[in-house]
Image (cartoon, helix red, strand yellow):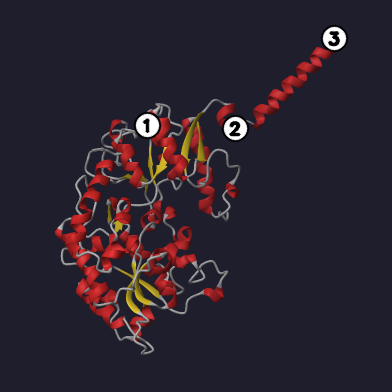
Amino acid sequence: MKKFTRIVGLVLALSMLLSIAVMPTALADDRRNIVIGLWWDMYYDSFDESWESNPSASGKDTDIMMFDVVKEIEEKYNVTIEYQNLTYQGVKDSLTDSVMAGAPDCDIYMVELGWGMPAVANGLAVNLHDVLPEDDPLFSHEDTVLNYVDIGDGVASLLTIQGAEDAVAATMPLAFNKQMLEEANLEDPRELVKRGEWTWDKFREYCKILTKDLDGDGVTDVYGYGAWTGDCFPQWLMSNGTYVAATATENFSSPEVGEVLKFMQDMYLVDKSFYPIPEENGWDICRWLYRDKKVAFTTTACWILSNYDDYNYDGKNPDGALDFDMVFVDYPIGPSGNAETNAKKVAAGSFYLIPTGVEDPQLVYNVFRDLHNWYHDDVSIRDDEDALEWWYTATAKDLDLQDWNFEVMNDMGQHVTVDFIASVIDNLELREFLEGAYTPSQLQESKKQIVQDTLDQLFGN
């Protein structure tokens, strides 16, 4: 009987050892597990076994550094890190429900600006002024790793990641078909930018020249400009030094916004150089008009140019490469704009916040910062061209043009503004307006309350 008991005891002990061996680190040694809630898969965390856990990694030095820094953080802070893909809706639900209940599911949440702001306004996010020393470089926007969205209310809650990739992300530059302009004997707009002559008037002049009926059938075949309103309207606002919804008070009714509306409608109705926006699937059609040479200028993005592998960026589609060049250039300056002070990118994409109720938020912040400082303050590694290869190769075949286009996007990322226009733009009826359903002043008067109501919700008024 004693022998049987000893055998059973050995089996149970062995089973316990095996179960401990396969348990996650966070449970095995009772470390604090820092959970980061996302809506897509990200790498690396404490439960990734090697750099190969990231299916898009190739084993380059930066992949190894990103993987290795997790182990360094574990030892430094006695924590583990866990990414959880909650899905887009899941993040919103978890942020609202668990934080309001006083027990956040996650230590950090990825959020969008449009619903991250209400979370901040309603006290669901930690104000880092209450957590970090006042001389922390975050607050002077001098930190090379993290930054925060500053809307002038004294709250530092919505974090952004620093770096060249984050600067160029979400930029929507103006681009032109180089060969079209050369065939029309038009001077390269980049030269006009240098001389301070790239204005709305000059742009309209170019677009009228470039709008053509190629076969003489009375139907326009090529337009000077074409873009989806949701993409281009924020860019034209910034080119005129203005915005729609950057503060708690709407600015849609301002004279400067009125100038933008008149400019766009005049191109559409008077010059007839703005490609007519289809009633159905306009976003899908307008973003790719340039591919069929239907427009000379367009508002675009790196992800738009890469969608159909236009320039064979991955070497897998040589037959699909376009036979013309798209060149990025600054937006022309409007009558109320200023080339030196205009914003060029609306803060967009992914933001992060530490929810109210999290234990030791300073520890959470330090872990998160170190995780994104995988390059150990050597920004030359972080911003190396090899690490940013896609951002170069997706926009052009010519190496010099790749460099040029990247620098335009990077410059846009250095001039960022906050504008919650994305939260209201679908209700502004811009397609109908361009077609003449409203005058600029009528549109402003009819929609300004919609903008204000949205801002009241965002700012918790």
Q: Residue at x 58, y 52 (%)?
A: 55
Query: CB atoms at circles 3 and 1 under 8 Å apart?
Result: no
Horizontal arrangement in the rendering, residue 48 relative to residue 372 (left or right): right
Question: Which of pointers 3 and 1 indicates the residue nearer the eye?
Answer: 3
Please tell me which residue lies in front, 219 or 361.
Answer: 219
Q: Secondary structure at mark 2?
A: loop
Q: What amino acid type is highlighted by mark number 2? A: Pro
Q: Is residue 173 positioned above or below 416 on the image? A: below
Please tell me which residue lies in front, 399 or 310.
Answer: 310
Residue 348 at what x, y percent from top left?
35, 52
Q: Residue at x 20, y 67 (%)?
A: 262
Q: Secondary structure at mark 3?
A: loop
Residue 173 at what x, y percent from top left?
34, 65
Q: What amino acid type is highlighted by mark number 3? A: Met
Q: Residue at x 29, y 50 (%)?
A: 420
Residue 273, visible in the rendered structure: yes
Horizontal arrangement in the rendering, residue 82 relative to residue 200 (left or right): right
